[in-house]
Image (cartoon, helix red, strand yellow):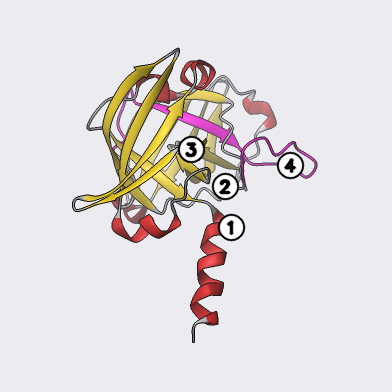
């Protein structure tokens, strides 16, 4: 379980195909405190640490995961990192599982005051879970949905990236056309399921 509060920006230093894809990620984390088998969210994708060194850790990424996530599994790619919550940790964002629900695409990025206004198209099956002032996770970052527009070409959500978020996550370099990992709010997921059964 995660909160969507990024605590390091890592970088992919090596990618090796060996059945699953072994990805090596450079990090500023104290890897001595990371156990093999621990979970780390990598731009919103919960992965298991299978190997580590003084300033890096490695994960195995399945073909299924690669097919369902954004284009982030290549050398040099920066990744938003978050270690799994511990009991008693502050829940600063919202409850995040690290299970990507779909891939969105950035429609536009514009400056607005000191922040950046970002608009992202979301897959049609995720549209019912998007609500103004609700929560969404984009590339592992907990964000508030500022607007939701349903149109003939799909649903577009509006987000505001404040300077702090831009400085401590990869969203500071987000560009038009970029594909991003989307995870819906877990509470919205359960509410929809409850509504489904209520209508039966």
Tag nearer the camera, 3 or 1: 1
Residue contact at pointers 4 and 1, CB within 8 angstroms: no
Name the residue at 75% across, 38% down. Answer: 89
Residue contact at pointers 3 and 2, CB within 8 angstroms: yes
Tag nearer the camera, 4 or 2: 2
The residue beneath circle 4 is 86
Count neighbours of disc 3 (C-alpha within 10 A) and say few if under 14, some if 14 to 19, many if 20 or more.
many
Q: Quadrant of residue 160?
A: top left
- Which stretch appears magenta? 71-94
Cα–Cα span, label 3 and label 2: 8 Å
Nearer to us in this view, 85 or 40: 85
The residue beneath circle 1 is 187
Mark found first going from the N terminus, 1 or 2: 2
Q: Is residue 137 shown in magenta?
A: no
Residue 147 image offset from top left, x and y in percent: 41, 40
Name the residue at 52% across, 62% down. Answer: 189
The residue beneath circle 3 is 140
């Amino acid at each position: 379980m995660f909160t969507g509060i990024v605590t390091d920006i890592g970088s992919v230093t090596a990618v090796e195909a060996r059945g699953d894809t072994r990805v090596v990620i450079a990090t500023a984390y104290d890897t001595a405190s990371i156990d093999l088998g621990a979970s780390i969210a990598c731009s919103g994708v919960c992965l298991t640490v299978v190997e580590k060194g003084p300033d890096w850790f490695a994960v195995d990424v399945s073909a299924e995961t690669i097919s369902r996530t954004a284009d982030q599994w290549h050398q040099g790619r920066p990744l938003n990192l978050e270690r799994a919550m511990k009991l008693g940790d502050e829940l600063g964002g919202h409850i995040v599982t690290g299970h990507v629900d779909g891939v969105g695409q950035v429609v536009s990025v514009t400056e607005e005051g000191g922040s950046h206004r970002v608009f992202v198209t979301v897959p049609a099956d995720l549209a019912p879970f998007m609500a103004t002032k609700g929560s969404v996770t984009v590339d592992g970052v907990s964000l508030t949905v500022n607007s939701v527009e349903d149109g003939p070409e799909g649903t577009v959500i509006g987000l505001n990236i404040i300077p702090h978020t831009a400085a401590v996550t990869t969203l500071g370099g987000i560009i038009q056309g970029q594909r991003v990992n989307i995870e819906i709010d877990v509470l919205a997921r359960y509410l929809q399921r409850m509504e489904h059964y209520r209508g039966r």
